[in-house]
Image (cartoon, rainbow, N blue to C red):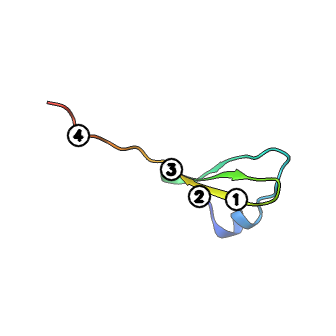
Amino acid sequence: MLTDAKLRTLKPRENAYRLADTNGLCIEKVRSSGAKVWRYRYRYASEPSS
């Protein structure tokens, strides 16, 4: 689980990287500048066909 303390300790690297949380939430990119980009990945479950 991503906590406030864990997010504050993320260090920028030469290449962007991803750190996932539960239920589709993740820090998509931790950029070399230190900026963090959030992404929520979800699936749309359509109704079953008859």
**Quarter of the N terminus within the rendering:** bottom right
Residue lying at 74% horizontally and 60% vertically, measured from the top left: 35
Label 1 sits on residue: 36
Q: Say few, some or many: other residues with alpha carbon within 10 Å of mark 3 (under 14 / 14 to 19 / 20 or more).
A: few
Q: Is residue 21 left or right of residue 11?
A: left
Element at label 1: strand
State the CA–CA distance, disc 3 to disc 4: 21 Å
Quadrant occupied by the C terminus: top left
The residues tagged by marks 1 and 4 sit, at their Cα atoms, a distance apart of 35 Å
Mark number, residue 47:
4
Q: Of helix, strand and loop, which one carries label 4?
A: loop
Q: Which residue is mark 3?
A: 24
Residue at mark 2 to residue at mark 4: CA–CA distance? 31 Å
Q: Nearer the viewer, mark 3 or mark 2?
A: 3
| Mark earlier in primary sequence (3, 4) | 3
Q: Which residue is mark 2?
A: 1
In whole angstroms, how far apart are the C-alphas of marks 3 and 2? Answer: 11 Å
1 or 2: tag closer to the N-terminus: 2
Give the distance between the C-alpha atoms of the residues marked 1 and 3, in whole angstroms: 16 Å
- Near mark 4 (Cα within 10 A), the count class, few <14, some 14-19 or many ≥20, is few
